[in-house]
Amino acid sequence: MRLFQCQCCGQVLHFENTKCLRCGRHVGYLPERGQMLAVEPEGSVWRIAADAASGEAKPNDDREGHAESGDNADAQADIDGPGLRFCANWERSACNWMVPAGEGEAFCLACCHNRTVPNLSDGVNHARWQKIEVAKRRLVYTLLRFGLPLPQPGGEHPEPLVFDFLADAPGATGRVLTGHSDGVITISLTEADDATREKMRTDMGEAYRTLLGHFRHEVGHYYWDILVRDGGHLEAFRALFGDDTEDYSAALGRHYANGARADWQEAHVSAYATMHAWEDWAETWAHYLHMVDTLETAAAFGLRVEPELDEDGELSAELDFDPHKVRRIRRLLAAWMPLTVALNALNRSMGQSDIYPFILAPAVLEKLGFVHDLIAQSRGAQA
C-alpha cells in the first residue's frame, strides 16, 4: 500500500484516513486517479480544497514510492464541473472513497460490488461490518492496481463480482460460512471479531488467518473462474496444481478427517492448500497478493533490507520499484525473501511470533510465478 499526503499541509495520510490529523481537512480517496484528495464542501458536492489546488503544499519527500501530493491542478481540472461526492457508505463511517458527482453513482468502485450487508441497527454488526469494509477496500485497491477485470453487478458480464456480508441468524443451528460460489463472495461477520477469529485459527491449526487474507483467498477463487477456466489456461493449471475436477466435497471431508501430509511444505504454501487444486490456487493467489501489497508498503517507507549472512555475502534488497508492474517474478522474490527475514526478526524483538510463518519451496515459487504471469497477461489484454 502506498502512502499519501495531504495537499494542504504535507501531512502523511494513510489509506484509511478520513481527515488529516494535522490541518483537519476532510480527505477522500479517488480510485480513478489513485489519489487521496483534501476536499471541502460546496453545496451538495465536494471540491478539492482551495489551498490544495493552488499547489502550495510541499511534498515531504520527492522520491517515487514515498508519500505524494499528486498533480493538484490536473485533478482540479478533471472535476471542476460536477465536483465529487463521497460514497454512500461514507455516511455510515464505512468508506472514504469518492465518486465524480456527475456520474450519478451512489457507491464507489469498491462498494458497488456489495449485494448484502448485515442489519446495521445492531451496533455489533455495524462495527464488524466497518472492519470488513476496510479489508475489502484494500483488496479492491490491489485489483485496480493490477488492472484486473472487475465486472459490476447489473452489467452484461455473466459472472460479476459480488459481496455478501452476513451475520449468523440468532438462534440458528447453522453458521454463515465464508466462501465463494459463481462470483459471489460471502464473508461471515464473525471473522471481524478478533478473539473469535484467533480461536478459529488456533483450533484449526492455521499459521495465518486475517480478514484481508479471507478476501484475497476468496477472490482467488473468483479469478480462477475468470483467468484460468474462462481464460484457456486449464491445462497449464493442472500441470502445476492438480486435478480441478476431483470431487470437492470428498476432498474437503478427507482433509478435515486426516489433515495434510507431513511433507506438504514441499509443494504447497499452506496445509489447507493440499485439500484440493482449487484451494491450492486460492492460497497461492492470496499469498501473491500478500507479497505485492507488503512490498509496496515497504517501498513507500523507503526500506532497505541488508542483513549479513556470512563471510561470502549478504542478503540485501532495494525496495524501490512498483511490484504491480514487475515483468519477472524473480525480482519480487529477490526483494521478498530478505524482507520477510527482517519482518520476523522485528516481531521477535517485540516478543511476538513470526509475522510470516511460511516456507516457499521451489514448487510453490513456480506456482506463484504462474499467478504472476496470468495477472500480467490479463493486464496486457485490458490495456
Image: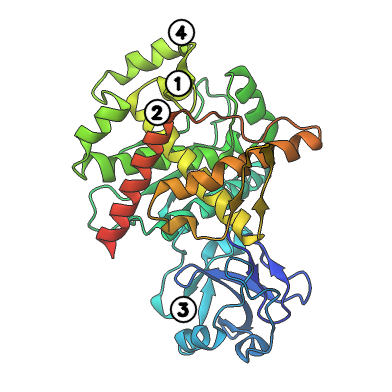
The mark closer to the camera, 3 or 1, is 1
- 46 up-or-down from 336: above or below: below
Residue type, mark 3 in image: Ala
Label 3 and label 4: CA atoms lie apart by 54 Å
Foreground tag (1 vs 4): 1
Task: Indicate the amino acid at tag 2.
Answer: Ala
Q: Residues within 10 Å of mark 2 (few under 14, many from 20)?
A: some
| Cα gap from disc 3 to disc 2, whole angstroms | 49 Å
Q: Quadrant of the N terminus?
A: bottom right
Which residue is situated farthest in the bottom direction here?
54
Pointer 1 and pointer 2: residues touching (CB < 8 Å)? yes
Q: CA distance from mark 1 to mark 4?
A: 21 Å
Mark 1 is surrounded, within 10 Å at the Cα level, by few (under 14), some (14 to 19) or many (20 or more) other residues, namely few
Q: Which residue is mark 1?
A: 266
Q: How many marks?
A: 4
Residue that mark 3 sits on? 101
The residue under label 4 is 257
Residue 336 at x, y = what percent? 55, 44
- Vertical arrangement, residue 50 with respect to residue 295, above or below: below
Q: Return the mark for residue 363.
A: 2
Q: Mark 1 or mark 3, which is nearer the start of the sequence?
A: 3
